[in-house]
Amino acid sequence: MSEGKVYLTGHILVPADRVEAVRAALPEHIELTRAEPGCLSFEVVEDADNPGQFNVSEVFENQAAFEAHQRRAQASPWFKVTEGIPRDFKITSG
């Protein structure tokens, strides 16, 4: 998994009482992630039919870039805003 691109797809389910905070924090999280070395694509979009469900699609150049993103995100305001929110992600490489 170290040489090929890393793909993450799935969603997070944000409780109604936290949706506004997540919406407010999302633009900065997207901007910072897209600026990371090795980030090829990063999309987080609220599902039009399911308010509070944010669909996630990420592509990183390789495993090292993906892991660097994870470390950065865990030290960010985004992590605090979304802490404890259920995530349903699938990670593949190729």
Image: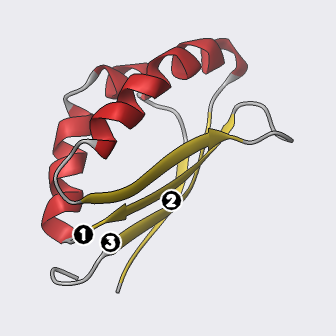
Location of residue 31 in the rendering, given as x and y in whole percent from the top left corner: 35, 33
Q: Which corner quadrant holds the N terminus? A: bottom left
Tell me if 14 is positioned left or right of 77 in this view: right
Do the residues under discs 1 and 3 have CB atoms within 8 angstroms? yes
Distance, label 2 to label 3, CA atoms, is: 13 Å
What's the amino acid at mark 1?
A: Glu
Location of residue 94 in the rendering, given as x and y in whole percent from the top left corner: 34, 86
- Residue labelled with disc 1: 61
Location of residue 91 in the rendering, given as x and y in whole percent from the top left corner: 41, 69
Q: Report crowding for label 3: few under 14, some 14 to 19, many 20 or more residues within 10 A (C-alpha).
A: many
Q: How is colour applied across the structure in the image?
A: secondary structure
Please, which residue is most extreme toward the right here?
Answer: 49
Decide which of 74, 39 is in the foreground and name it. Answer: 39
SS assignment at label 1:
loop
Mark 1 or mark 3, whichever is nearer to me: 1
> Quadrant of the rendered structure where residue 76 is?
top left
- Residue labelled with disc 3: 6
SS assignment at label 2:
strand
Residue at (62%, 41%) from the top-left corner?
45
Location of residue 56 in the rendering, given as x and y in whole percent from the top left corner: 54, 51
- Mark positioned earlier in the residue sequence (1 or 3): 3
Residue at (54%, 13%) from the top-left corner?
21
In this rendering, the answer to whether 16 lies above or below 50 is above
Q: How many marks?
A: 3
